[in-house]
Amino acid sequence: MSAPKFTTLTARCVVLANNDVDTDQIIPARFLKVTDKLGLGEKLFCDWRYHDDGSPNPAFILNQAEAKGAQILVAGNNFGCGSSREHAPWALVGWGFQAVISPMFADIFKGNSLKNGLIPVVIQPAAHAALLAARAKNHDLPVTVDLRASTVAWPGQDPISFPIDPFSRACLLDGVDELGYLQKFAGQAQAYEARHA
Amino acid sequence: MSQNPKTLFQKIWDNHVVAEEPGAPAVLYIDLHLVHEVTSPQAFSVLKERGLKVLRPDRTVATMDHSIPTKGGYEAADEMGRIQLRLLEANAIAHGVRIYGLNSVQRGIVHVIGPEQGFTQPGMTIVCGDSHTSTHGAFGSLGFGIGTSEVGHVLATQCLLQRKARTCEVRVDGALRPGVTAKDIILAVLAKIGVGGGTGHVFEYTGSAIRALDMEGRMTVCNMSIEGGARAGMVAPDDKTFNYVAGREFAPKGAAWDQAVARWRQLPTDQGASYDKTVTLDAHSLEPMVTFGTNPGQGVAITQPLPLPSSLADAAERAGLEKSLAYMKFEAGKPILGQPVDVVFLGSCTNSRLVDLRAAAHLLRGRKVASSVKMMVVPGSQSVKQAAEAEGLDKIFKEAGADWREAGCSMCIAMNGDQLSPGQLAVSTSNRNFEGRQGKGGRTVLASPLTAVATAVAGCIADPRVLLNGGQS
């Protein structure tokens, strides 16, 4: 298994601006019986995306023509709150998303996303509002997430810096495997155990 | 005053840093890793792909709780559930990890059995692929939920890469009035700070109301720290903590116990240490709390009317409240008391311990669950179940008309056969009222075990203080 890599992405976006979207909405618990990561993209936002009979709900954004080919999700505040299930970023990545833009992410979701090459782009509420306004005028608005520069931009908007953990950023730019990195500390962990025995 | 005063969190953090390279997160040593069937399969797969073994099986404990049916037996699970449960068993055996399997008399919800068996101890770092690992902070440990990638990291290295969180003191002073419980404290905290209010922080609960809680109450409070966005919630250990841990199977014994207690007494936050922020709450003014919306921060005192969207200035917040009320089929400005309910669920890692069942049974004794209500009582562990049965609590629940089940997460997570039907309204002692959390289309009101019982008896959302005062609802 290779570590995820990300440098830059320019893509169309879809908007799901509700605040406090929790991981139970991203991927309901009944789909957590999988023992691999496959097929979760089909269940992304399942209870909003499909009617009870399994047919697509045309009112939901992912079922609309404008969602086709989009790779960036513009989300509301506190996206990914709730459970620690990594199935949430697996489902988002499985659908085709590579970045989520929000004023704030829940901590565990943010960490899980970074480990799967899904970039949590945190921008200030004013910039978020500007992005929503630009997107409302142009459904094909191309948004660029540049990880090397740690900036996000769209036509008419100068690049805006976003905060990202420098270690996670370096891992994603260089394809560094975090477990491999941790294993290098085996000797120090042993010494720690000896000191605390 | 200490020269360099530290918080409880800072002390545990400093004591567990194995290494820290410039620009990189700390390599944090993990004392205890709890594992369950749902968030571990892909982590064990990574170990298999790389030819790795679990580094410290002696620091790893596995149990089955999330997808296990509470009717008992694998047969009750669907095929994917059976595969997942058997895979956990196979992984545990292959790696020499202790497992509380299907037929173990000590099996139970991971956050119930950790403390119950004495694995959870003050000063430890404790992780699990489950966000309610914050529960263990009640013992003055640092417990937090991790994703499956991190489960793999801990299995393979017993370490995690972590950035230090900020600290938030949640100070709760004053005496609780009758009928008001630990659950009401945390629901009131969440109503005050909102579901994102603790993001980036670790909570330390302080104040006379927290000190007065028993260990079960402290676990209830710490359990729901994550509902405020805080990955961990902690309470400084004291004699109550030590008395709870003493004598449990995996607690230190003899001279090791004395040394451990001496160490644990050094853990509480030093006088003069500072937190990044502080939130305060007056316990004496609290009433029983219920949630009315679709996140745990949307709570009100049970006697209060539901909030009006027009009272919110922020458009997104207003839209959120309107959406929540519409989903719940509740009307703004109206009371929540008297709303007819279909299901009452007593259980989950928040409120399924013996103390919770005792309090509920005490209130239910000699009363009946309303004929329109289905009540389920699900002990947090098989040990809790046996202890409750030894006291005759099961008889009280069954005679009242409630369903008495085997231990598990049950209807809190709705992936084990226990779930609401679309449209049903439940009062639950669990921790999340997200849309569909207890079953697609189901509606959840979070409350204390006392409020759950009062509601079950009345057939509608009811104030437990009426029953406590001897009144018939």
Image (cartoon, grey):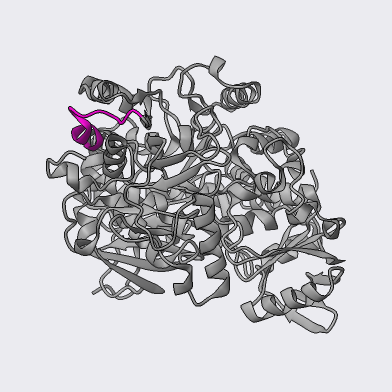
Is B306 colored magenta in this rendering? no
* Image position of B60 with respect to B126: above or below: above
- The percent coordinates of residue B64 (x first, y second) are 50, 28
Q: Is residue B126 visible?
A: no
Nearest to the observer: residue A52 or residue A113: A52
Tell me: B433 left or right of B271.
Answer: right
Nearest to the observer: residue B392 or residue B421: B421
* Image position of A97 with respect to B198: above or below: above
- The residue positioned 32% from the left and 50% from the top of the image is B337
Total numbered labels: 0
Tell me: B350 left or right of B158.
Answer: left
- The percent coordinates of residue A131 (x first, y second) are 74, 76
> Quadrant of the image for the C terminus of chain B?
top left
Is B363 colored magenta in this rendering? yes
Q: Which residues are magenta?
A: B359-371
- The residue positioned 50% from the left and 53% from the top of the image is B294
Tell me: B56 left or right of B47.
Answer: left
Nearest to the observer: residue B269 or residue A75: A75
Where is residue B374, by image quadrant?
top left
> Quadrant of the image for the N terminus of chain B?
bottom left
- The percent coordinates of residue B43 (x first, y second) are 65, 38
- The residue positioned 80% from the left and 84% from the top of the image is A158
Where is residue B44, by image quadrant?
top right
- The residue positioned 45% from the left and 17% from the top of the image is B103
Q: Is residue A45 visible?
A: yes
* Image position of B122 with respect to B53: above or below: below
